[in-house]
Image (cartoon, rainbow, N blue to C red):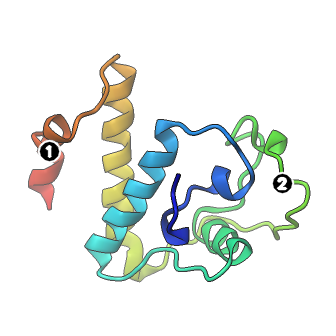
């Protein structure tokens, strides 16, 4: 369970009961972005404000980019305005770094391996920082 609201994945905020590595990757991405930018990426005070901040930054999800999105338990109850992706200049570097880091994790997982901290830490991605 992700307790801290700032690192909670959108699917948890939208009522899923299924916990997966995607939820951990989201939390890790938020923490990495915070470390790189030296400020919280998404610092909502309520669950609705947190979702709004996510959607303003990354764009409002749709069934096309997130298959199964419309089936999440509370999607129909949340009336989120449509937002396009809008990464502020102050977060652009952190966002790009975190995006490439998550791509690294996806590539490792797609290769049939579970990412380990030691294995990921040896990757050349960390030499870029």
Q: CA distance from mark 1 to mark 2?
A: 36 Å
- Disc 1 + disc 2, Cβ < 8 Å: no
| Residue 121 located left or right of residue 17 | left
- Residue at 61% of width from left, 67% of height from top? 54
Q: Secondary structure at mark 2?
A: loop
- Residue at 13% of width from left, 39% of height from top? 118
Q: Pointer 2: what residue?
A: 74
Q: Is label 1 or label 2 in front? A: 2
In the rendered image, residue 49, in percent from the top left (x then y), is placed at 69, 78
Q: Nearer the viewer, residue 42 or 74?
A: 74
Q: Is residue 24 above or below residue 68?
A: below
Q: Is residue 118 above or below residue 55?
A: above
| Residue 124 located left or right of residue 7 | left
Q: Within 10 Å of the Cα at label 2, are there few (<14), some (14-19), or many (20+) other Cα atoms? A: some
| Residue 120 located left or right of residue 83 | left
- Dot 1 or dot 2: first in sequence order is 2
Q: Secondary structure at mark 1?
A: helix
Q: Which mark is residue 121?
A: 1
- Residue at 36% of width from left, 82% of height from top? 39
User: Farthest residue toward the top?
Assistant: 112
């Amino acid at each position: 369970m992700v307790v801290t609201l700032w690192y909670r994945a959108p699917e948890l905020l939208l009522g899923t009961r299924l916990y997966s590595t995607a939820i951990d990757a989201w939390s890790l991405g938020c923490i990495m972005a915070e470390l790189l930018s030296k400020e919280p990426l998404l610092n909502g005070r309520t669950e609705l404000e947190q979702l709004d901040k996510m959607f303003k930054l990354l764009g409002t999800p749709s069934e096309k980019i997130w298959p199964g999105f419309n089936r999440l338990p509370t999607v129909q109850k949340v009336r989120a305005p449509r937002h396009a992706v809008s990464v502020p200049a102050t977060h652009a570097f952190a966002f790009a770094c975190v995006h490439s880091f998550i791509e690294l994790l996806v590539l490792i997982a797609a290769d049939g391996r579970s990412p380990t901290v030691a294995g990921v830490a040896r990757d050349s991605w960390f030499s870029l920082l």
